[in-house]
Image (cartoon, rainbow, N blue to C red):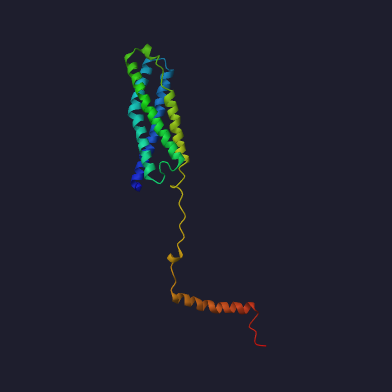
């Protein structure tokens, strides 16, 4: 298990990278939509060059760190990696999104290099990259919502204090018990005398 200090640090890095991944994917999608809708070759070229830089130097590192820190948190805390179904789903979707990203980025690099070598008229016909970042962003948002709504577990539920066994309970000293018997004895006799209507003599 992770020590509390390391657990908080890993959790902070995981949250920062996960949220950053979503933000970078949204920025990438905005560039792709701009390249898809624009008829200006210079804008389309600039968008593809920006998408390549954003993908390799922002999205890929953030995705790798989010996945790595997520695995460390799962294995280093009581959550576990396969103990809860939603943790396994989040891990599977994150891994799938990162693999698809790594397989897709070489084509982005090739298109960016091609856009840098052609004139504005040809660059305007390249269009943009919309499908991959759109689906990827939906997957990332789903993972974030799943993690938020399904984490009300061991970290938020405090188990009830166990009842101490009889052997562990403090025992009163014999002197205290005798004193209590002396106080209880007359009181018990008086209550019996009152309830029976007084003490009757012999007939």
Number of marks:
0
Q: Position of residue 9 (x, y in %)?
A: 34, 43
Residue 12 occupies quadrant: top left
Q: Residue at x 43, y 39 (%)?
A: 87
Query: Horizontal placement of 202 versus 157: left or right?
Result: right
The quadrant of the rendering that contains the C terminus is bottom right
Q: Residue at x 41, y 34 (%)?
A: 94
* Residue 163 sits above or below residue 18 on the image: below
* Residue 187 sits above or below residue 68 on the image: below
Q: Report the residue that reaches farthest toward the front.
A: 82
Query: Horizontal placement of 153 versus 118: left or right?
Result: right
Q: Report the residue that reaches farthest toward the right.
A: 203
| 114 and 106: which is toward the camera | 106
Report if residue 149 is visible in the image: yes
| 153 and 148: which is toward the camera | 153
* Residue 102 sits above or below residue 146 on the image: above
Residue 18 occupies quadrant: top left
Q: Position of residue 14 (x, y in %)?
A: 37, 38
Q: Residue at x 37, y 32 (%)?
A: 63
Residue 137 occupies quadrant: top left
| 46 and 70: which is toward the camera | 70
Report if residue 23 is visible in the image: no
Q: Position of residue 162 (x, y in %)?
A: 46, 58
Q: Position of residue 76 (x, y in %)?
A: 36, 44
């Amino acid at each position: 298990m992770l020590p509390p200090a390391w657990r908080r640090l890993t959790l902070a890095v995981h949250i920062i990278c996960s949220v950053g991944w979503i933000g970078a994917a949204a920025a990438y999608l905005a560039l792709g939509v701009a390249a898809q809708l624009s008829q200006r070759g210079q804008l389309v070229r600039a968008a593809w060059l920006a998408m390549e830089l954003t993908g390799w130097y922002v999205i890929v590192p953030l995705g790798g760190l989010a996945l790595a820190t997520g695995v460390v948190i799962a294995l280093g805390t009581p959550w576990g990696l396969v103990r809860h179904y939603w943790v396994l789903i989040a891990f599977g979707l994150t891994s799938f999104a990162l693999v698809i990203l790594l397989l897709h980025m070489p084509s982005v690099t090739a298109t960016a290099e091609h856009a840098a070598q052609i004139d504005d008229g040809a660059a305007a016909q390249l269009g943009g990259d919309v499908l991959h970042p759109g689906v990827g962003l939906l997957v990332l948002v789903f993972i974030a919502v799943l993690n938020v709504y399904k984490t009300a577990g061991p970290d938020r539920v405090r188990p009830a204090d166990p009842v101490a066994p009889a052997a562990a309970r403090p025992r009163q000293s014999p002197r205290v018990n005798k004193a209590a018997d002396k106080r209880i004895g007359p009181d018990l006799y008086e209550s019996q005398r009152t309830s029976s209507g007084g003490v009757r003599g012999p007939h």
